[in-house]
Image (cartoon, grey):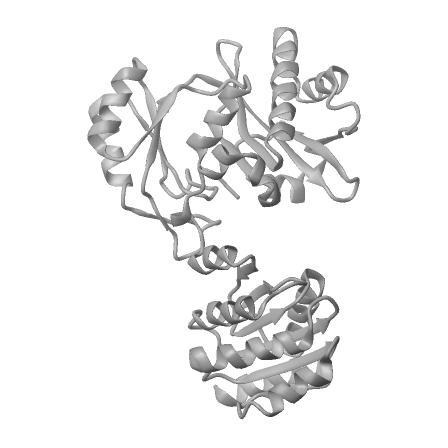
Amino acid sequence: MNVHEYQAKAILRKFGVPVPDGHVCYNGASAREWAKRLGEGPWVVKAQIHAGGRGKGGGVKLARTSSEVQMIARDMLGMTLRTHQTGPEGKVVHRVLVENGCNIANELYVSLLVDRGSSRVTVMASTEGGMDIEEVAANTPEKIITEAVDPLVGLTPFQCRKIAFSLGLKGKLTNKAVKVLSNLYTTFIACDCSLLEINPLVVTAEGDLLALDAKFGFDDNALFRHLQIGDMRDFDEEDPNEIEASQHDLSYISLNGNIGCLVNGAGLAMATMDIIKHYGGDPANFLDVGGGATIERVTEAFKIILSDKNVKGILVNIFGGIMKCDVIATGVIEAARQVGIQVPLVVRLEGTNVELGKKLLAESGLNIVAADGMADGAQKIVAAVAAAA
């Protein structure tokens, strides 16, 4: 789960990480009044969407008078903001953050993430703050500093000082950086984060450190421990199908292809998408019904897949262990009757109760193509979609 910048800064403020004073606003008049309450300008008006690159898209602007704040906010609210992360369709701005400007002397980059290679929380830092970190990693990887954290010890003051020195910080700024980095690590662990990114972490002309922008990613599986964070979820920023899938305990991610996938197990789902690509097709989604899916959940999975108008065919690929093939077969039949599947449907079943599952499908009277394996299933659905085009 992601949150907006203003929500991220509220969390950081709670854990003692310095952030600019600001307030979220939903109309121009409110933005003007809050600018006055925040003190003398200049102020920064920031569009609040779940995407980076807002500044390049016109979603971050400087205002020197409260009237200018009102005008900028009014123009931003309701606009469709397009960045390299939103794609060409963009995202509609429903709220803006108005906050105090600051005198920036230097911009740095700091993030904490879970490094799967080392199985540890790792701090990444760079002197190239404010830039796309992907470009820095690709073009000047030597400018990225990494520090893995021992989970039994935590992020130590020594490691914080090491990072600060690597960023070129000296004197009092080193001590301030140690405190900021330590508090960021505390935030990361306390909130069960998967990502915490500060870009940029700025050094001000007055000699302070400020988290000028912040991005959080939270582990969805731990949200039951953080009800207040869960309440920050903005459904307007998410794919409606992904929201619907989460209501039925389905793991679903929408993609840009035209072949819908219904699979049990994340690994098998990834392999299914790969083999579809291998045979010239393009998967429309990642969908894992899980190991203990019910007939109702399978039916809902089909409804979600078919709600995507780009789907021109469906491949069901099930290896039945805990998930029984006859349950999947019954779900497929029920979904076909409820929804009315009008696109080619290929089903590959293997494992527990496979013969019963195949028998149910064969006797259903539905137009279902049986497959003998993954490769056979992928070839058949790709060919069927191509023939129907």
- Residue at left offset 65%, top offset 7%: 171
The location of residue 176, given as percent across then percent down, is 61, 12
Q: Residue furthest top?
A: 172
Note whether 374 is above or below 366 in the view shown. above
Depth check: give the residue in front, 159 or 152: 152
Q: Quadrant of residue 111?
A: top right
At x 56%, y 70%, the residue is 298
Q: Position of residue 363 (x, y in %)?
A: 59, 92
Q: As rendered, which of 323 and 277 lies closer to the eye?
A: 323
Q: Is residue 346 above or below residue 295?
A: below
The answer to whether residue 314 is visible is: no
Q: Position of residue 74 (x, y in %)?
A: 23, 37
Asked which quadrant contains residue 179, the reply is: top right
Query: How far from the left and from the top, in percent, is residue 3?
Result: 47, 38
- State the residue at coordinates (58%, 78%): 330
Q: Horizontal placement of 276 versus 210: left or right?
A: right
Left or right of residue 250: residue 29: left
Quarter of the view holding residue 20: top left
